[in-house]
Amino acid sequence: MSVGGGAASLTLPQLAKDDEGLYTIRIFTKDGTAEHSAYLFVSDVPASIKGAPGAPMSVKAYDINSDYVLVAWKPPNTVNEAPITGYFVDRCEAGTDTWVQCNTAPVKVCKYPVNGLSVGHSYYFRVRAVNSAGISSPSRKSDKVTAIDAAESERLQGTDEGTELPVGVPSAPGKVVATRNTKSSVFVQWEAPKHLKSLMGYYIDGRVVGAKEWFPCNHKPFRHNRFVVHGLIPGESYVFRVQAVNIFGLSEESQESSPIAVEPALATPSAPYGITMLSCDGSSMTLAWKSPKHCGGSKVNAYYIDKRDADTLVWKEVNLAAVTERICTVDNLTEGIFYEFRIQAGNLAGVGLPSAPSAPMKCDAWTMEQPGPAYDLSFSEVRGDSLIILWKAPVYTGANAVTGYFVDMAKKGSSEFVTLNGEPVSHHYLQVTGLQEGNSYVFRVRAVNSNGVGKPSELSEPVCAKALPGTTEIVAGVDEENGDVFLSFEACEICETSKFVWSKNYKPIGDCPRANVSVKGRTSRLTFTNPDKDDLGRYSVVVTDTDGVSSSHTLTEDALNTMLELSYTIRHPVVPLKHSLNYEILEKGHVRFWLQAVKLSPSLSYRFIVNDKEVTSGEGQKISHDVASGVIQMTVDHFTRANEGTYTVQINDGKAKTQSSLVLVGDAFKAALKEAEFQRKEHIRKQGPHFSEYLDFTVSEDCTVMLTCKVANVKKDTSFHWYKEDDEIVPESPPNVMSGACALPLPLFSRKDQGVYKAVLSDDKGKDTSVFDISGQVFDDIINAIARNAGASASELVMQCTPEGIRLQCYMNYYTEEMKTVWKHKESKIASSEKMRIWGH
């Protein structure tokens, strides 16, 4: 994997079916984490025999000994192939290219013990699957394995000298029973096989309920018929099976166990604690207490309160019916008497031990004007440097309503409290920052009303500023299938009784029409039904019956708008186009209207609309598409003035839609029509003998001008005639049309050769004419071409003495007075005069 330049890439060399699966990249930034996933589909290498299975996967070696290795693998993906009847295991010694088949007959299970290895030698292993059609291609080879551990080899061969081992594998183990053990382990027991046959031990496999793949629980034979499977996911359900093994191989699998959820064994809850008084009116007291530290593996659903006078030993029941909340008002008390209280908690396993007696509490009516204590202090989102503290409002408010709260904090063991907020907060929570990771803190809360600050709450339990291992945060996203905007949280810990409790601004959401909550395994999702500005705020989630698994996320307006845009795109997807609607003129004058999409599926539908009217394939036009290239097209055979207008293509491909239009009117239409008519005439012309290249000129090295042309679709009796100003020219050599080219020489070219030249080609299939006007610029171009060739042949200047005077002259292949000649003396042009004459012939 490489990371840099704002990009990350994962390269998979020698891709195989084993590499198929869901790949996820997790990005950590100062703003949190983000995840992106994609499923990689890998096609099997085509089998050499039609109908043979795909290659097995995930070949691994376990229980490595000096001459023995247990090879295990996963079956190949099957599509329409015949069922797999067995497997062949091959080995290859490292440093060689020779593969040796280890078993003579196919083994039916996905494990095989390979014997006969050489001590200290290294090996690779591969597996081939077999069905009625033939044998698959080999799997990807295993990692290199070295045969060592002589002690294990001696153990495997541990039989008395001269005693022969019984031949054959053991029978399958009997009934398998799985029971609760801890929150991440399960206790598995099974009955021994009826036929042991020198049993070496057992292999235990597990599988998540609903999954297809089994995973090994041990990698060496386990001798006993009971085993603790560790490392399981809390709250997940599993089934187990067992195989027996001896040196001849593995038994058949046992029957699967019944499903078992990974939860601690049930027990009664521990005692509640922290009993405190919240209010007293002289004849009754309102009490509150803290939940048991251990729920016993089942939700606490009942509390029972006992009371006694502080100077007696006899306890009396307060409530016969269970109290379900951690608050209770005890009536029929005597004013001025001190009372003690104790509480018991109950769950499915029964009622637990009572709590320690509370401190003596005097039944005196509260008359202070300040509020009573807040209660039920709890913590959420505990991280290395921050946490959220929450509390409940006082039962006793004093003379006036509570207007706010102060939160005090001290390090564990210290009595020096620091008030965290300078001004009272009106809500029942506070985010505490600036903690030192690993340190423990205690908190208390004081309520405020217009008469002053009230009694402090009981001290909270000490809380350590440290995140739980595997802690994740809430992720905001948009569902790729339906465009729903959601908040999602994956718990790092969960149990059977756990619930996800979502809150907005730390007030439980409950049943709310604006959002709904779903749970799948360890993940809960809060989905907004119709999100808007009213949904902005801080959302939090707490997983009950865990060690404080929780998280929060603030939904801002910018983030919501971004997600709403993505949601709209998903719910109203657009078919992306490489090229919008365009046209091209084809031969015969046909006009092709076309566009190209980035991708099309076989189930797409589309229609062409011309001037607000749908057109279909039929006489005069053909409509078609190609899924592979993404092209949709309509070809109009005869393009006329009636075809002027607006062309539109509307596409529906699954949920995605798009349309593209082309306006072909005015000058744009006239240009298209002109080109179409030209191509149509060209097509008709080319049905008979015709000029593939029209008349043009060339100049040879000897300065002879040649009129040339090329012809096509001719035959022996095709006639060819030259004309100048409608007067036929009969060249010395008659034209040879079968050669594909004709030429007319114009020797000693001069002004006399100006005029309109014409070449006529005809036979019974048709007639074609090419016209070439030698005048004006064309004449000048020919003269210039002659001058270039003549100048290239010019000799050096020669000086002669003649009766007329001194003559400077040169010789060239050809000269005509139409050629422009310039003489220079040094850098100055020389003109004719009385003393100097310029001429040529």
Image (tube, grey):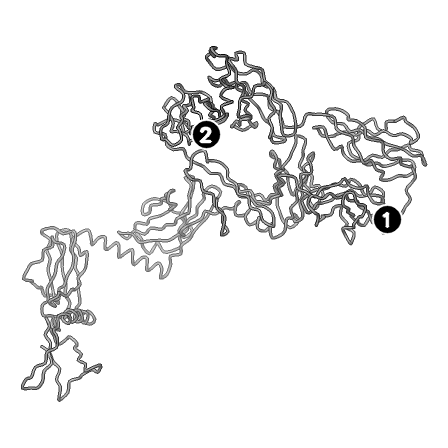
- Disc 2, SS: strand
Query: Amino acid type of disc 2?
Result: Val
Q: Is residue 605 above or below residue 802?
A: above
In this view, the residue in front, 359 or 329, is 359
Q: Is residue 720 above or below residue 657?
A: below
Residue at 60% over, 53% down: 558
Q: Quick check: 381 left or right of 352?
A: left
Please provide percent x and percent y for residue 609: 41, 49
- Residue placed under numbered mark 2 in the picture: 145
Please provide percent x and percent y for residue 210: 55, 28
Residue at 40% over, 54% down: 662
In this view, the residue in front, 795 or 541, is 795
Classify 10 Å Cα crowding around label 1: few (below 14), some (14-19), many (20 and above).
Answer: some
In this view, the residue in front, 75 or 69, is 69
In the picture, residue 226 is in which quadrant? top right
Mark found first going from the N terminus, 2 or 1: 2
Please provide percent x and percent y for residue 346: 76, 27
Q: Quick check: 207 left or right of 297?
A: left
Considering every residue shown, the one lying at the far right of the view is 336
Please provide percent x and percent y for residue 82: 40, 24
Q: Is residue 47 among the parts visible in the rendering?
A: yes
Q: Is residue 79 among the parts visible in the rendering?
A: no
Residue at 35% over, 58% down: 669
- Residue placed under numbered mark 1 in the picture: 400
Residue at 9% over, 68% down: 747
The C terminus - image quarter = bottom left
